[in-house]
Image: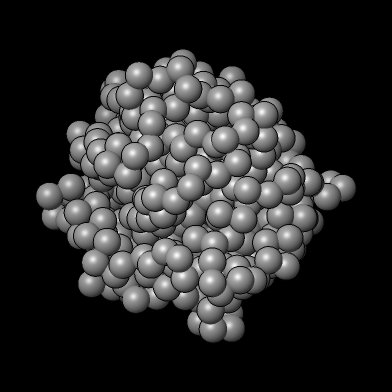
Amino acid sequence: MRSPFLCAAALTLAFASPALAETWTVKREWVSAHENFLASEALQGRGSATRDEAIAAAYIASQFEGFGLKPAPGMTGYLQTAWVIQPRLEGPVTLSIGGQAVDGVQLLSSSGNNISGKIKVFTGEDTKTMSAADVIMATPGAKTPLPGLTRAARAKGAKLIILRESDDTKKYWEAGGKTTGMSAYLESDPPAKPGMAIAILPAATYDRLARDGADTVLTLPEIIKTRSQTTNAIGYLQGSDLSAGTILYTAHLDALGVKGDTVVYGANDDASGTTAVLEIARALAAGKPPRRSVMFVAYGAEELGLLGSLYFAKNPPVPLKDIIANLEFEMIGAQDPKLPANTLMMTGFERSDFGETMKAQGAQVTADPYPEYRFFERSDNYQLALQGIVAHTVSGWATTPNYHSPQDTVANLNIDFMTSAIQSLIAPARWLANSDYVPQWKPGGKPVAK
């Protein structure tokens, strides 16, 4: 799931007919085998747009081919590649507030631009009350988590948000290898405007400098840009009625990779979702061809900003108008203790009739209990949703303490839970592929590009 946030996916679905559900058995050893390769020491966390990511994509492509899936229309193979530009800072940054140089600044992410402007300090709990400003100072808390603060600041047009150091900010700083992250972008689709920078100040320094109206200047060193390739793995199951449309099942195959001197293996985020896509593909390919076509995609470069899914959305193998629905899977390696047993969340549940319709078919899925984290916008489904496709991510424990940490390993997965969750997906996936049902956005539910 995309930083800083987040982010995450799983679904437990049970079809109304037990007989159909029993026609295919997902084997625990299949699930374990995928995880033990994708989250292995050999792949070093499948860093976005790296050789390790490409190896993971090749593995997934080989699985698709072995299951009997074909290349997608217009493709000669199972891999779709795109060039990515990754900027990085070469040297220290300087920050001054009210003409006073600030020590101890951690620049979590950079827009790539020098920044100047007036500060507004946000002290509330409802981000809707945040004032517009070039520079916003804020303190993450239980009701105002870091992702929610940064998204609210972006919506207010901020060039820079300065955060008071907290356990939340420390986690993100360490997960990023204690280096400044800069927004990567597709070479074919450079950003139209700079993003927002995120800085962290020690608590004592923050408290001393937080004042409304102070002048702020952030100065960057030289920016170095590297060019690398990201890879999507795509498999296609052709339906018997080409006019019936295509169902899209997706996950992201990359993780954070090597950060500093540690490896973030990404066993849950999102080798687990990738495993779900693989096993649904295996099951559907083994049966009678469905009425609708089904496409399975494992995206690259999600952790760089949903770049693999962005490239797919701009270069789809089938017309976007033919995609009936998209279901993304993230982090199905553990169940959220906040939810009832065997009940999992769908991001943006209230935005369309997709979740409630699947639930009527026996899906044990409910609304996202973490609206403040805005998970709907933080996973690959969002790139498809922005194109008008009803697209959601299904998630298990979206706020697991192992998120984006070196502890996200196979040893910390519940393989039995994963196997059960994937098993429960098979019959509903068959129903969707053979039905006439077309999900619809509810009024105001369809997202609009900002």
Displayed quadrant of residue 230: top left
Which residue occupies the foreground of this view, 391 or 90?
A: 391
Residue ID at (38%, 31%): 70
Which residue occupies the foreground of this view, 438 or 188?
A: 438
Q: In screen coordinates, is 416 left or right of 41?
A: right
Residue 198 appears in the rendering: no
Q: Position of residue 362 (x, y in %)?
A: 65, 71
Displayed quadrant of residue 147: bottom right
Q: Position of residue 377 (x, y in %)?
A: 61, 47
Q: Position of residue 254 (x, y in %)?
A: 33, 44
Residue ID at (38%, 55%): 279
Q: Position of residue 208 (x, y in %)?
A: 53, 60
Q: In screen coordinates, is 335 left or right of 241?
A: left
Q: Residue furthest right?
A: 443
Displayed quadrant of residue 133: top right
Which part of the image, by quadrant, shows the C terminus?
top right
Residue ID at (29%, 70%): 28
Residue 187 appears in the rendering: yes
